[in-house]
Image (cartoon, rainbow, N blue to C red):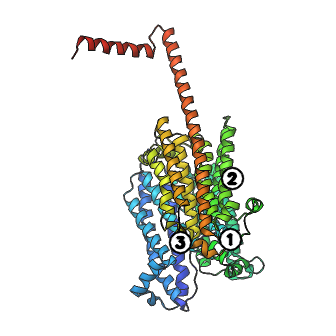
Amino acid sequence: MAVVATHNHSLSSNSVVDVLLPVVKDFYLISIITSIGLLFAIGFLVHENRGKLTKESHRLRSLVQLATVVWMVCSVGGAFVELANLLGGGLLDSFNTSVLRSFLFSTSIGRDYVFQILMGVLALALVARAKKVGAVYFALAATMLAILIPLFQSHAASAGNHGLAIGALIFHVGAVSLWVGGVIGLTAISPRERSESITRFSAFALWAAIIVGVSGVLSAWTRLNFLAGWHSRYGFLVLLKVILFLVLVCIGSRHRAHIASQLSGSKQVFRLLINESLVMLVAVGIGGWLSTSVPPISPSEILAASDPSIAITGIKMPAAPTVGRIFSAYSPDGTMLGFLLLITALYIYGVVVLSRRGDKWPVGRTISFAIAVSLVDFATSGGIGVYAHFAFSYHMLAHMILGMIAPIGFVLSAPITLALRTLPQGRTPEERGIRGVLISIIHSRYSLIITNPVIALGLFDGSLFLLYMTPLFGKLMQSHSGHLLMDIHFLLAGYLFFYVIVGIDPNPRKIPHIVRIIVLFAAMSIHAFFSIALLSTTTLLDGGYFASLDRPWNTNLLSDQHTGGSLGWVMGEIPILIALIATFIQWMRDDSREAKRLDRAADRAAAMGEEDELAKYNKYLASLAKGDQQHPD
C-alpha cells in the first residue's frame, strides 16, 4: 500500500539530483495527503452546524492552509528537480528561463506540474475564504485532482493495456490518499470529536482498504513481469508495500473490532492512531521512492514497442469485426470498470440496508440499474469499447449507448431516492450528515440551473457539435485521458437530460409535461440535424487519428465516418422516442392521480356539508360575472 507518483525518468548522472528527486516527491506526497486528510476530517468527521464550519473546523482549516502551501512549494521544487533529471545535468541547469518555460508548457510532465500548482492555488483560495462546508468539498476535489490527474503520465501510461493499468493506479492512489489522509485527519482532531468520529471513519476505511488491496494487485500485475520482475528493486519495493498494507489492515481490523466499543476516547486510541499514521507515512515514502524506479520491461511493453496500435491505444489491433468477436472481445478500461464496480457495490449495499430494515425496493429498479451498468461496460471495456478505439462507426455506437441508452437505465433505477433512504443522517439535530448534504445539493442554486430543460438540452445535444465539428475530437482521441473524458461526458450529459425529462428521483424543478415534450421534440430535431451534417462531411473529423492506426479492415475512413452518422441517427432517435412515450404515460398518470385527489376532496367536503373546490370555483366565477354586470364599462 503506497502512492505511486507520476513521473520516473532517471536520466540524471548527478548524484544530488538523484537524491533530491525521491525526497521532493516524498515531501510532496506526505503534505498533499495530509491536506486531503484534514479536508476530509472537516467535511465528514468533525461536527458542523447546518452547513457552517465550527470552531474545531476553523482550527483544522489553518492546518490545511499550511499543508497546502507545503505541497505547492514541493511541486515548484519538484518541477526544477524533474527538469534537471531529464536534462541529465546538475540542478542549476534547470534554472534556464527558456528551457524551464518550454518544459512547463510544451511537455506533458511540465503541464502536470503547472496543473498541480493551479489546483493548489484554487484549494488555498477556497479554504482561506471558507465559512461553509461546501467550500471545503470543492477544495478537497481540487486537491484530489492535483494528485490524480498527473497519473495519466505515469509508468502505467507507457505500458500495453494501459487502460487497466491507469485505472488501477487512479483508484489505488485515490483510496490511499483518503485512507491515509483520513487517519492523519482523525489524529489531528480533538479527543471529543475523535471519539464520536472513529466509528464513522472505521466503516469508510474498510471500503478504502478493499479498494487499495484490489487495485494494488492489478497495478502491480500490469507493470511487473511475474517471472523476473520480483528480483528487481522495483519488485522488492512492491513486496515491501504489500507487507505494510497487511500491517495496516491488521491495525484497522483492531480499530473496528475493539477500539470503537472498548477504548473510545482513551489515550490508547490516540497512540494506536499515531502508530498507524507512522506506518502509513513509511508506505507513502516507499511510494515516492518507487516512483523514481523504472519497473522491469514486461512482455506487453516489448509488444507495444513493435505494434503501433498498442503504442497508440494500449490495445492490440483486433481482427475485422464480426458479431462473435464483438461479443467476445474484452479489454478492461480500469477507470470506468472501477467506477462501475464501486457504484454497483454501493447500490447493492443500499438495497441490503433497506431489506434489513424491512423496506422493499422495487425489483424493476434494480434490474434497470444492472442493465445500465452492463451497457456501460460493454461500450467501454467490451467489444464495442474495443472497436471504438479503431473505427469511427464503433465510436459513435459506443457514444449512443453511453449517452442515449444507458442513462435511461440509470435514471429509472432511482439512485438518488435509494441514497436518500439509506444514507446516514447527522449525529445531532444541527448536523446535516451525508443525507443532508445530498438534499442541500439537490436544492442548491447550481442544481436549479443545470436542471433547467434548456440547459440540459444544450449539454446533451449542443456538445455534439462542439466535439465533432471542431478539432477537439481529434485531440481527445489521441490519448487515453481524452477518450475517458468523452465517455464520462456522454454518460453524465445523457443522465442529466433524461433525469430532467423522465426522472423519478427528486428534482428541484417542477417541469410541466408539455415543456418536456417540446424539449424532446427539439432534441430529436437537433440530433437528426447533427446526423445529417455528419453524413454530409467530405473530410475526416479525427485529425488523422484513425489513419495513424493503419487498420487492415474497413479501410475507407470517410465511408466509415458516414456509417457512424447513420448509426447516430437511428440509435439517437429511438431512445428519445421511448422517452416521449414515457412522458405521455407519466402525464396521463399524473392527471389520473390529480382527478382522484379532487374526487376524494369533493367526497370529504360533501360528507362535512361543505362545498367542493369545483363548486367554490364556479361560485367565484359567478361573482365576477355579477360584478361586471353591476359595473359595465
Q: Position of residue 172 (x, y in %)?
A: 62, 65
Mark 1 residue type: Ile
Q: Is label 1 in contact with label 2 (beta carbons under 8 Å)?
A: no
Q: Is label 1 in contact with label 3 (beta carbons under 8 Å)?
A: no
Mark 3 residue type: Gly
- Badge 3 element: loop
Graded by Cα atoms within 10 Å as few (under 14), some (14 to 19) or many (20 or more), the crowding at tag 3 reads some
User: Reading the chain from its start, which is encountered first: label 2 or label 3?
Assistant: 2
- Badge 2 element: helix
Q: Is residue 229 above or below residue 358?
A: below
Examine the image and state in which quarter residue 274 appears: bottom right
Q: Which residue is mark 1?
A: 315
Q: Which is nearer the eye, 244 or 111?
A: 111
**Residue placed farthest to the top in the image?**
609
Q: Which residue is mark 3?
A: 543
Q: Which mark is residue 374?
A: 2
Q: Position of residue 633 (x, y in %)?
A: 21, 17
Q: Which is nearer the eye, 608 or 63?
A: 608
